[in-house]
Amino acid sequence: MREESILMVEKAIQDSKDYPTKKELWKSLPKKIQYKSFKLILSYLEKKNKIIFYDDKILWIFPSKKLKKIMQGSVRVDI
């Protein structure tokens, strides 16, 4: 797993207009990588709390403009 590949996947997730599925994201990458390596990168990003999987979609949760926009429109729930 090369740093260049990790950064490429991170950028593709951040730049996507919608939250892609694994297959959609993999096919959209500018440079092709093996699917096994791709899944390993996604696992790494999930462990680093940069992404989560929700309804088969990939969500970038590391501080970003998308996350800030979602948070501004959300309702706080105290438990």
Image (tube, rainbow, N blue to C red):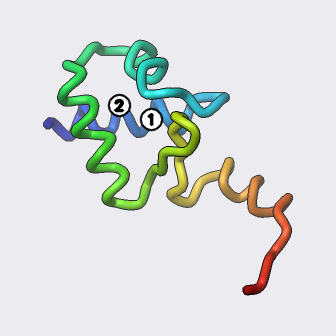
Q: Is residue 18 above or below residue 40?
A: above
Q: Position of residue 67 (x, y in %)?
A: 66, 54
> Which residue is situated farthest in the bottom direction here?
79
Q: Is residue 42 toward the left or the right of residue 16 in the image?
A: left
* Residue at the spot of label 2: 8
Q: Residue at x 49, y 35 (%)?
A: 13
Identity, as a three-letter code, of the amino acid under mark 2: Met
Q: Is residue 53 toward the left or the right of residue 71 in the image?
A: left
In which quarter of the view is residue 70 placed?
A: bottom right
Q: Secondary structure at mark 1?
A: helix
Q: Which mark is residue 64?
A: none
Q: Dot 2, crowdedness within 10 Å: few (<14), some or many (≥20)?
A: some
Q: Secondary structure at mark 2?
A: helix
* Residue at the spot of label 1: 11
Image quarter of the C terminus: bottom right
Identity, as a three-letter code, of the amino acid under mark 1: Lys
Q: Is residue 31 above or below residue 2?
A: above
Q: Dot 1, crowdedness within 10 Å: few (<14), some or many (≥20)?
A: few
Q: Is residue 27 toward the left or the right of residue 14 in the image?
A: left
14 or 54: nearer the viewer: 54
Q: Position of residue 24 (x, y in %)?
A: 48, 18
Image quarter of the N terminus: top left
Q: Residue at x 45, y 35 (%)?
A: 11
Q: Marks 2 and 1: CB-CB under 8 Å?
A: yes
Q: Residue at x 46, y 50 (%)?
A: 51
